[in-house]
Image: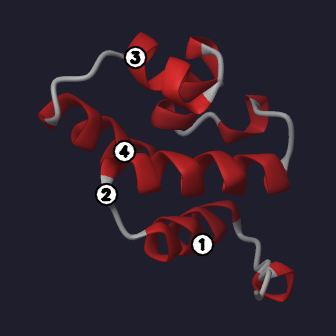
Amino acid sequence: PGETLRQAREQKGLSLSQVAGQLNLTENSLRQLENGAFDKLPGHTFSRGYIRAYAKLMGLDQAELVNSFDHFTGTNASGSTVQS
């Protein structure tokens, strides 16, 4: 999912710094996310939230990218869905 997010950011002509500011995340966290270094992020739940927020900002399918992340990390957090 990180590569997809990076490509979307670059296609929109946005810098890592710009996106980090809009998401209230550090550039380092976004860099790790884009590079697939999920083990360096604060935790699985936070990583899923970062991916969801980043995907939304880029106009991408949030669920698809979160599912890709879950598959990549070998986890299944389907029980954590929040319903309104």
Indicate the amino acid at tag 3.
Gln
Using a 10 Å C-alpha cutoff, classify the residue at mark 4 as few (fewer than 14 neighbours), some (14 to 19) or many (20 or more). Answer: many
Q: Residues within 10 Å of mark 3 (few under 14, many from 20)?
A: few
State the CA–CA distance, disc 3 to disc 1: 28 Å
Residue linked to disc 2:
59
Q: Secondary structure at mark 4?
A: helix
Image-based side of 20 in relation to 44, left or right: left
**Vertical order, 48 against 13 (above or below):** below
Taking 7 as reference, is 69 left or right?
A: right
- Return the disc, 3 or 2, that comes first in the chain's sequence: 3
Is residue 1 shown to the viewer in this render?
no
Residue at which label 3 appears: 18
Q: At x 52% / y 21%, what residue is drawn?
A: 20
Q: Earlier in the sequence, mark 3 or mark 4?
A: 4
The span from disc 4 to disc 1 (Cα, nearest Å) is 16 Å
Disc tally is 4
Q: Which residue is mark 1?
A: 71
What's the amino acid at mark 2?
Answer: Gly
Callout in the foreground (1, 2): 2
Lower sequence index among marks 4 and 1: 4
Label 4, on which residue?
Answer: 5
Q: Which of the colour schemes (rainbow, by chain, secondary structure, one colour) is used? A: secondary structure
Q: Earlier in the sequence, mark 2 or mark 4?
A: 4
Question: Which kind of residue does numbered mark 1 sit on?
Answer: His
Q: Are marks 3 and 4 in contact (CB under 8 Å)?
A: no
Q: Earlier in the sequence, mark 3 or mark 1?
A: 3
Residue 78, percent from left and from top = 76, 86
Is the N terminus in the top left, top right, bottom left or bottom right quadrant? bottom left
Q: Which numbered mark, 4 or 1, is in the foreground of this view?
A: 4
Separation of residues labelled 1 and 2 (CA atoms): 21 Å
Q: Choose top left, top right, bottom left or bottom right for residue 74.
A: bottom right
